[in-house]
């Protein structure tokens, strides 16, 4: 469903499992930090609302969105996390750079999900302009960081249920 029809921060609180025993990695891009900072804040606050402990939330930065794949892979290799949330923001410009960064990052994250036992949550905002990004980083459409946190919790729970 298009974001225009769904607030990214709207969810059934009671449908989200307890996160108190879960470990989270968050890799966040420094580029467009006004947006990625707000997304990070949303993700961390939502994780905590569901019981995640501060010491079980590992945050690392990378220079840009293209580096999210490498950062996520390194976090997985560390063995310190049960899920990784990859947060970035790419705003369309006048050159095809936007297309390459978005496609490469999306493919990289998809590859990690296909080959790893640790889920990587796609928190890359790809917008046509800065207003659209602001709308999705705590603005009128909610916060994609909230949605990513809920997804991370649910994916860890999914894995735990399969292992039982």
Image: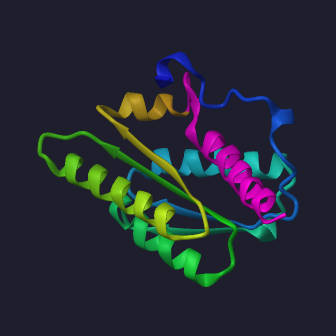
129 horizontally vs 137: left or right = left
93 horizontally vs 70: left or right = left
Q: Position of residue 93 (x, y in %)?
A: 19, 41
Q: Is residue 149 above or below residue 9?
A: below
Question: Which residue is located at x 87 percent, y 51 percent?
Answer: 18
Question: Which residue is located at x 39 percent, y 28 percent?
Answer: 131
Residue 124 is a magenta residue: no
Main secondary-structure element of the magenta-colored stretch: helix
* Direction top: furthest residue: 5
Q: Which residues are magenta?
A: 138-164
**What is the image's colouring?**
rainbow
User: Split into 4 quadrants, where in the image is the C terminus?
Assistant: bottom right
Residue 156 is a magenta residue: yes
Question: Which residue is located at x 56 percent, y 82 percent?
Answer: 77
Q: Position of residue 60 (x, y in %)?
A: 56, 70
* Direction left: furthest residue: 95
Q: How many marks?
A: 0
Q: Position of residue 14 (x, y in %)?
A: 87, 34
Q: Is residue 62 above or below residue 17?
A: below
Q: Position of residue 132 (x, y in %)?
A: 40, 29
* Direction bottom: furthest residue: 78
Question: Which residue is located at x 73 percent, y 29 percent?
Answer: 11
Name the one closer to the observer, 37 or 23.
Answer: 23
Say which quarter of the image contains residue 144.
top right
Name the one closer to the observer, 33 or 15.
Answer: 15
């Amino acid at each position: 469903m298009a974001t225009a029809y769904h607030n990214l921060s709207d969810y059934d609180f009671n449908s989200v499992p307890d996160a108190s025993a879960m470990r989270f990695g968050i890799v966040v891009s420094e580029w467009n930090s006004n947006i990625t900072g707000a997304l990070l804040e949303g993700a961390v606050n939502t994780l905590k609302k569901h019981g995640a402990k501060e010491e079980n939330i590992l945050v690392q930065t990378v220079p840009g969105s293209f580096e999210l794949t490498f950062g996520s892979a390194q976090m997985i290799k560390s063995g310190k996390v049960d899920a990784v949330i990859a947060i970035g923001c790419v705003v369309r410009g006048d050159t095809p750079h936007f297309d390459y960064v978005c496609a490469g990052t999306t493919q990289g994250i998809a590859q990690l999900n296909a080959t790893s036992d640790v889920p990587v949550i796609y928190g890359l905002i790809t917008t046509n302009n800065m207003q659209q990004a602001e709308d999705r980083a705590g603005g009128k459409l909610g916060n994609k960081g909230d949605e990513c946190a809920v997804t991370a919790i649910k994916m860890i729970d999914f894995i735990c249920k399969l292992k039982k």
